[in-house]
Amino acid sequence: MPDQLLFAMEVSLNGLMTGIMYALVALGFVLIYKASGIFNYSQGVMALFAAMTLVGIQEGRVPFSHLINSIFGTHITEFGFEVPALLAILLTVAVMIAFALFVQKFVFRHLVGQEPIILFMATIGLAYFLEGVSDLMWGSEIRQLDVGLPQGINGAIDNATFEALGYGFFIDNLDISAAIIAAILVAVLIAFAQYTKQGRAMRAVADDHQAALSVGISLNYVWILVWSLAGIVALVAGVMWGSKSGVQFSLSLIALKALPVLMLGGFTSIPGAIIGGLIIGMGEALFEFVVSSNDLFGAWFGFTFSATENWFAYVLALAFLVFRPQGLFGERIIERV
Amino acid sequence: MDGQTSTVTPDGRTIGGVVMEMRNITLRFGGVIAIKDISFDVRHGEIRAIIGPNGAGKSSMLNVISGFYNPQEGEVWYKGEKRKPMKPYQVARQGIARTFQNIALFDGMTVLDNIMTGRLNHMKASILDQAIWWGRAEREEVANRQKAEEVIDFLEIQSIRKTPVGRLPYGLKKRVELARALVAEPEILLLDEPMAGMNVEEKEDMCRFILDVNDEFGTTIVLIEHDMGVVMDISDRVVVMDYGKKIGDGVPDEVRNNPDVIDAYLGVAHD
Ligand SMILES: Nc1ncnc2c1ncn2[C@@H]1O[C@H](COP(=O)(O)OP(=O)(O)OP(=O)(O)O)[C@@H](O)[C@H]1O
Ligand SMILES: [Mg+2]
């Protein structure tokens, strides 16, 4: 096989891995949107907050230590012990569930029946609020996150592809574990939605509020549930992204990556979020490869693109939208007259 | 009728004491008074109809009973106790199931899935039990499936069990909605125009189902219906509403000969 093709395959594979991360973030949006019609702008900040909390707990930091110290004149910053990764993850999940309860009790409970734009603006407020809380609780320094996921180039794949194709694929172990964990998460979520009573209630609420109420489902309960699940999904995304590039403010910007995925996959479809994420991830990587890896493109068109990762996903999504306004898997838009 | 002792109807069904009572209910929407100081009771095991011209406030009354609307004034008494203002899901959990005038089904789900949601309140297994699919969770699911199948057989909708509800014709949707309400094994079943928009044959089927539900399971039924023939045929007692007021209440014959009722129906076009 020609080198260029093999190289392109490697790039696509890596793109797919990145796409899974996009899909994870998009999934958080879909969960909440489907059940409550709220477009949760704060999903990205939730990922940041979850990752910050996880690192903080792992390293045994005292939450709100700046605040405490400035009020009481103390100098405590750490408890002086480290928390094992698994326990820290469980504690972070508990924090995300507490956040879900908080959001429902103090924000959205009071906004039931409001226009979608008002709900959306409430989530913008929530994003800034959570960002502030995150800062206050854990500080704003960049932190290294390590929950024990394998890192580095996967030797087995490198060797196997080298023997078979004469060209070794470089795939990061972290990406592979991210893919596996994402796949498990999605499978569990789908099984939950399909086979448990809570999942059934969730699907019912996503479908029709009135009907759900009439069979005895508490909307409030289901909304707390979906915010909790979105919090857990945010945690997973935060861990993946954070392990890769450190936990810092820019993590919250992964939400911007989820938007084109949602445009593509539709706001109401879980498979859409996943396939959409994969398409965007791969498309982005391939495009980047085509325009930057050789001078061919520049030679053909007489110019080159830069910073494609910032905008190409949107162009790709928009191109799809022209043909399918409801997204790949979104429900058909039928105009009733 | 003293409201406490049982009576036996001419067709041999036993009607018990008062199970639900509306006392001086008033419901306003801004300036519109949808229900004006209405009182009536529902007795255990009876078929109680609410009739009246369009906009009379019948659906509003059903919505008050099911907790979708909370009246500004008045009391709802259920099983001898005054009910606090409640959310619809809390009312449903007390054994009051309903259907809607404009059909509220889960369009994205199959008929069977829709019906299974009616069993949610009968599931007690914890999330952990369900995760390992063991003991209680499995027993419950089996029992619930069985109940759902019973109702499906009862309403003769076996052939559409796996069909997504969104694709069904109107008449069948109404039947699925009834199935979902029925599968919850409610004490009181509230039906908002269960036969509206149906052809004669479908109406006959629906009538038969309603009578059978009442007869076989002893379910108390409160129903709104426009078709006078049907109402007079199947109900034990009838409340008549007009412009938010109660203008008649009694057995079909009493109501039929009530001059106010005759006026209301002659004065207002109805379908
Ligand atoms: N949610 C609401 N908001 C405002 N007004 C309402 C609402 N629900 C009902 N109304 C008003 O209350 C009055 C009674 O309406 P309701 O739906 O109870 O009548 P109905 O007897 O069921 O009529 P129909 O036979 O047409 O179904 C009407 O004037 C209606 O416009
Ligand atoms: Mg009505």
Image (tube, grey):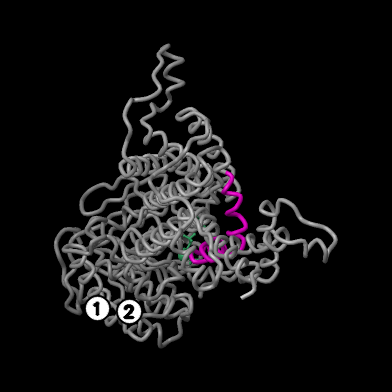
SS of the residue under disc 2: helix
**Residue B162 position by quadrant:** bottom left
Residue A262 painted magenta:
yes
Outermost residue toward the right? Answer: A302
* Distance in Å between CA atoms under marks 2 and 1: 27 Å
Task: For the N terminus of chain B, give its image quadrant.
Answer: bottom left
**Which residue sits furthest left?**
B5
x and y, in percent, of residue B158 in the image: 32, 84
Where's residue A310, x and y in %?
68, 51
Q: Position of residue B92 (x, y in %)?
A: 31, 58
**Amino acid at pointer 1:** Glu
> Which residue matches tag 2?
B233
Label 2 CB, ligand 1: below 8 Å?
Answer: no
Foreground residue among A224 and A138 = A138
Q: Which residue is mark 1?
A: B150
Which region shows up in magenta? A253-278
Label 2 is found on which chain of the structure?
Answer: B
Label 1 chain ID: B
Viewer-closest of B92 and B224: B92
- Looking at the image, residue B178 lies above or below residue B37: below
Asked if the stretch drawn in magenta spans residue B169, the answer is no
